[in-house]
Image (cartoon, grey):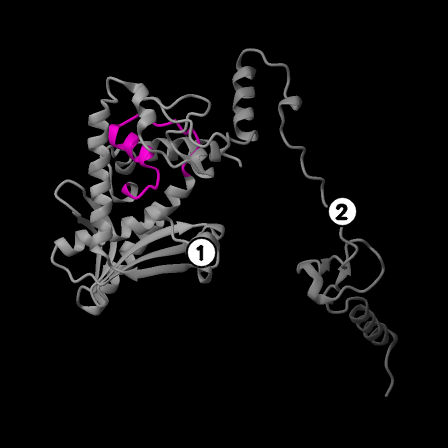
Amino acid sequence: MSVDQATLDSVIASLTAKKAAPAAAQPKPYCLANCGERLDPMLVIDPATGSGWHIGCEPEPAPAPEPVTIATLPAASGKSAAMERFVRAVTSPPPPTLDDLRAVLYDHEANSARSRQKKIGPSEIGVPCQRALAYKLAGAPEQPDLRLPWAPIQGTAVHAYIADALTAHNEILGRERWIVEQKVWPDDTISGSGDAYDCDTGTVIDWKLVGDSSITKYRKQMRPEYRVQAHLYGLGHQRAGRDVRWVRVVCLSRSWDYGKSWEWTEPYDPELAQKALDRLYATESLLTDLDVANNPAMWGAVPATPTKDCRYCRFFRPNTPADDTGCPGNPDPWA
């Protein structure tokens, strides 16, 4: 069978056309840095072109813009002055919060019920120095203390937290084991707020938030004011009809470790509480007999007990004779 030349040419042309137009191939992944290395498909960022970046081939990031400062602003004039003040407000740190908080806390504490209390209470009756007790009774001006009373503020906060916790514990028990923040009257004129009374054990409890060094000192001898205060609260609870058997001062450590806390306990002694009240009223009578209101120099006749702690007394006026403005206390308070 013979094939003419025209047919042969037609077959050859069709084969050549198919070879010249192969099916469109998928683009191979390639690095935009044209490094010549094949790009892993996992690094492709543009599926349409199959392109991406090798790790290490990425371009350097653009530098961060310079922060806006007053120095970079044009000279202030007209509206630019207002812009300068705005930029200063948003780029400069605000005033110290510690300073603002100090002022707020100081004012709040100065106006608290405790700070405004003028009448003497159980916490002050047991002070060893009779002259200090007399100054408090007479309402003598106290030495101003401009320091923030940070320790008392902490103590107030801890007392409030414990009161909430004991009240909640009563609810869990379904009965009143704890009598919390109860106002008690050791006699008809003296009153105070007792921190807690444990009905299960007949124990009057007073919380004290103190430093570890104070706890070490109180282990040797409990502070007289605290001891008298506990027994006066005991007398107040007894007069309210409760069975008081023990008094306790719980010294809570101001450090992070609750385990450093310690408590002092002794049997309730109503006679000790009554003696403290008798001393209070005897001091009041002494002030009347000496007529210190009209004879300030007679303050020197009120017995004093100078110690190294005189420097902490709110009536301490060194290098001056005792009068209605204060007391010289220990002549060498740092001895």
Q: How many marks?
A: 2
Q: Residue at x 28, y 52 (%)?
A: 230
Q: Main secondary structure of the magenta part?
A: loop
Residue 99 drawn in magenta? no
The quarter of the image holding the N terminus is bottom right
Q: Quadrant of residue 145?
A: top left
Image coordinates for residue 104, horizontal then vertical, percent: 38, 32
Tell me the magenta residue range: 125-149
Q: Is residue 182 above or below residue 258?
A: above
Residue 323, can we see it?
yes
Q: Quadrant of residue 290?
A: top left
Residue 144 drawn in magenta? yes
Image coordinates for residue 52, horizontal then vertical, percent: 72, 57
**Observer-nearest residue: 222 or 88?**
222
Q: Residue at x 81, y 71 (%)?
A: 19
Callout 1: 10 Å neighbours few (<14), some, many (20+)? few
Secondary structure category for the residue under label 1 = helix
Left or right: residue 65 versus residue 159 is right
Q: Which residue is mark 2?
A: 60
- Tell me the kind of residue under disc 2: Glu
Secondary structure category for the residue under label 2 = loop
Q: CA distance from mark 2 to mark 1?
A: 71 Å
